[in-house]
Amino acid sequence: MLRRYPVKSMLGEELAACDVTSRGLAGDRELALVHRETGKVASAKNPRAWRGLLKLAAASGAAASGPAVQVTFPDGTAMASNDPGLDAALSRFLRQPVTLTATPPPGAVLDRADPGQVLRDGIRARVHVETGHLGAAAPEGTFFDFAPLHLLATSTLDQVARLSPRGTVEPERYRPNIIIRMTAPGFAENDWAGRDLRIGPDLAIRVIALTPRCAIPTLEHGRLPRDRDALRVPASHNLISARAGLSPQPCVGAYAQVLHPGRIKVGDPVSVA
């Protein structure tokens, strides 16, 4: 499965095939909302302020005036990213003054709520919020939290589902770019750190860290209800250091950088070196 998120923290789209460059899947996190007063990038990692982003859907499309991303509101209203009225509509919906942009502000930062406190106290509680910089391992000028690709193994989804009281977990909650089918059980990405993967005939990537989870998997995603177990399960069963020097955190998935670009499609073979 391939998934792209044209606007940061909005719902994304499923793809049959996609070009992958050093900046990740073509069109991924191409745009983001910036708060007009604070200059911070809007992210559902701070759910008390921005959980409404996950009620909006973004998809690549074409408007009459040229290529554009389509933003769809919960009532079905769709607006193009180059529509001059979109910023006002988004600001009304989110009750925050925002601007949709393709250019990160200088020294771009976002707020992250403490996931443990969100689990304990709920999304509306005044939990501790930290401000952090975007894209420590991503190309300059992008909106990625850390790196340009996020990988997720089906065995990890199966493990979380098996341990969850609901008996299921939706992959959308973890916002992966590439879901890799695995037959071996368990949290497969734990063994990928520092290793190279080949996907299809051309794409080569390197896994640089596991993915520590924030509060986002627990939130409503469109029609999907809240699910605290999407975070509670990895917090109980895969508390591990995401990379050297970090304290253990609940991890699901892995971050990767692109070594050699290429086009990939659903069903391509994957090899781990």
Image: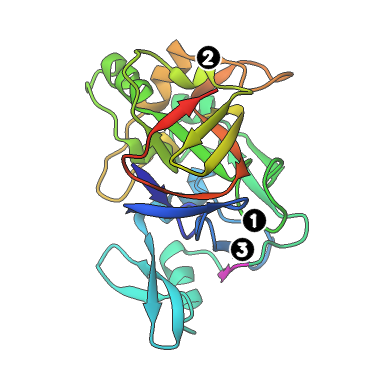
Residue 7, percent from left and from top: 48, 60
Badge 3 element: strand
Q: Quadrant of residue 273?
A: top right
* Quadrant containing the N terminus in the rendered view: top left
The reply to whether residue 238 is in sight is yes
- Mark 2 or mark 1, whichever is nearer to me: 1
Circle count: 3
Residue 41: x %, y % from top left: 62, 56
How far is disc 3 from disc 1 in space, using C-alphas?
Answer: 17 Å
Residue 75: % across, % down: 25, 67
The amino acid on which the numbered mark 2 sits, given as a three-letter code, is: Leu
At horizontal 61% and vertical 15% (from top left) the residue drawn is: 248
The residue positioned 69% from the left and 60% from the top of the image is 38
Question: In the rendered image, which residue does mark 1 sit on?
Answer: 142
Residue mark closest to the camera, 3 vs 1: 1
Disc 2 and disc 1: Cα gap in Å?
29 Å
Q: Amino acid at mark 1?
A: Thr
* Viewer-nearest residue: 240 or 137: 137
Q: Give the magenta-colored segment's residue range.
A: 98-102
Give the overall secondary structure of the magenta segment: strand
Residue corresponding to mark 2: 239
Q: CA distance from mark 3 to mark 2?
A: 33 Å
Residue where numbered disc 3 is placed: 35
Where residue 195 appears, as percent x and y from the top left, is: 60, 24
